[in-house]
Image (tube, rainbow, N blue to C red):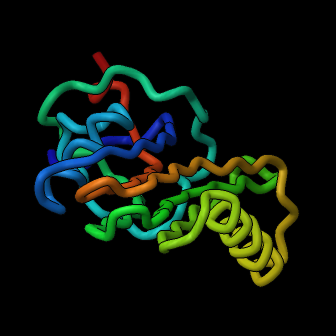
Amino acid sequence: MLWKKVTKVAATAGHAEGSTPLNAFDNALLAAGIGNINLVKISSIVPPDVDIVDLPQIKPGALIPTAYAWETSSVPGEVISAAVGYALPKDRTRAGVIMEHHAKVPRAEAERMIRQMLEEAFRVRGEAIREWKVFAAEHRVERVGCAVAAVTLLSEEDIL
């Protein structure tokens, strides 16, 4: 079966240089601790009643549903950032929300955008936020740089 029951959610961020944009992206994923898994791009919902955990060791090659943002640049000296954040409702039986943002801005600006988007998402849903957190990476480009941030949805069988 391709999809397993999601029981845990973990977020991370990283940044790195590379010789090409794809190498920089790969190196940033490695720096974030998710470079040896297959990210399956998802939209932005946290399933109800899951545990938020620190990023565990994930089985290499695992297919992991992930909401992520990344920014690359080959302009020396340019500052780039990527950020993700999640917000969870007071009622654990309700779904939470994940937001992603990437831009050629400092980390603080990316983090501010995430907070603003999470607040709007909950306002529109008529929900109160129980918990929220933002993960972001900033990178000053030397040759080719990348910043990445991700929220992974994990099952027990994905974890080493």
Q: Is residue 86 left or right of residue 137?
A: right
Task: Choose top left, top right, bottom left or bottom right for residue 69.
Answer: bottom left
Q: Position of residue 15 (x, y in %)?
A: 39, 46
The residue at the point 30 percent across, 37 percent down is 34
Number of dots carrying numbers: 0
The residue positioned 87% from the left and 63% from the top of the image is: 128
**Where residue 112 appears, x then y in whole percent?**
73, 66
- Outermost residue to the right: 128
Above or below 77: residue 12:
above
Q: Residue at x 16, y 28 (%)?
A: 60
- Return the residue nearer the eye: 92 or 60: 60
* Most foreground residue, 104 or 90: 104
In this view, which residue lies farthest toward the bottom? 124
Coordinates of residue 141 in the picture (x, y in percent): 36, 57
State left or right for residue 138 relative to residue 34: right
Would residue 152 be found to the left or right of residue 120 on screen? Answer: left
Above or below, 81 relative to 103: above
Residue plotted at (42% across, 42% down): 14
Q: Position of residue 42 (x, y in %)?
A: 36, 65
Q: Quadrant of residue 160?
A: top left
Image quadrant occupied by the N terminus: top left
